[in-house]
Image (tube, helix red, strand yellow):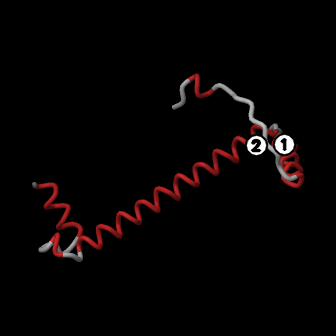
Amino acid sequence: MHTLKQLEKQQVGLRLHRYLVDEIDELTETFSLNRSEIIAEAIRSYLSAQRESLFYANFDEGCQELNAALNTSQVEGFKSLDDLIDELENN
């Protein structure tokens, strides 16, 4: 959740290509929204996609590191991730 302070609106100026403004204006008519609402939703969607992409990139990196660790003598005796998890949970 956001605080009241975070929900305050702040004016931001930006310059867009005319074709983007035209497309935004088409959506304002189609969905009965204003430019600000459409641009804000586009930004929220973009930020969400970027956070998701970063999460999965970090997750993949962690999996690769774990796989590399499983293939070294550092975790000798563990044949699978389940074996390693069991050992970590019990010690």
Q: Which mark is residue 28?
A: 1
Comparing 12 with 80, the one in front is 12
Comparing 12 with 19, the one in front is 12
Residue at 85% across, 53% down: 17
- First along the sequence among labels 2 and 1: 1
Q: Position of residue 41 (x, y in %)?
A: 69, 43
Q: CA distance from mark 2 to mark 1?
A: 7 Å
- Helix, strand or loop at mark 1: helix
Q: Quarter of the image holding residue 87?
A: bottom left
Q: Position of residue 42 (x, y in %)?
A: 70, 47
- Helix, strand or loop at mark 2: helix
Q: Position of residue 30 (x, y in %)?
A: 85, 46
Q: Position of residue 29 (x, y in %)?
A: 88, 43
Quadrant containing the C terminus is: bottom left
Disc 2 residue type (three-letter):
Ile
Disc 1 residue type (three-letter):
Thr
Q: Residues within 10 Å of mark 2 (few under 14, many from 20)?
A: some
Residue at 54% across, 25% down: 3
Give yes or no for contact between labels 2 and 1 (Cβ–Cβ under 8 Å): yes
Q: Quarter of the image holding residue 11?
A: top right
Residue at 35% across, 67% down: 63
Q: Which mark is residue 85?
A: none
User: In the figure, is residue 19 to the left or right of 6?
Assistant: right
Tell me: residue 30, above or below residue 68.
above
Q: Which mark is residue 38?
A: 2
Q: Residues within 10 Å of mark 1 (few under 14, many from 20)?
A: some
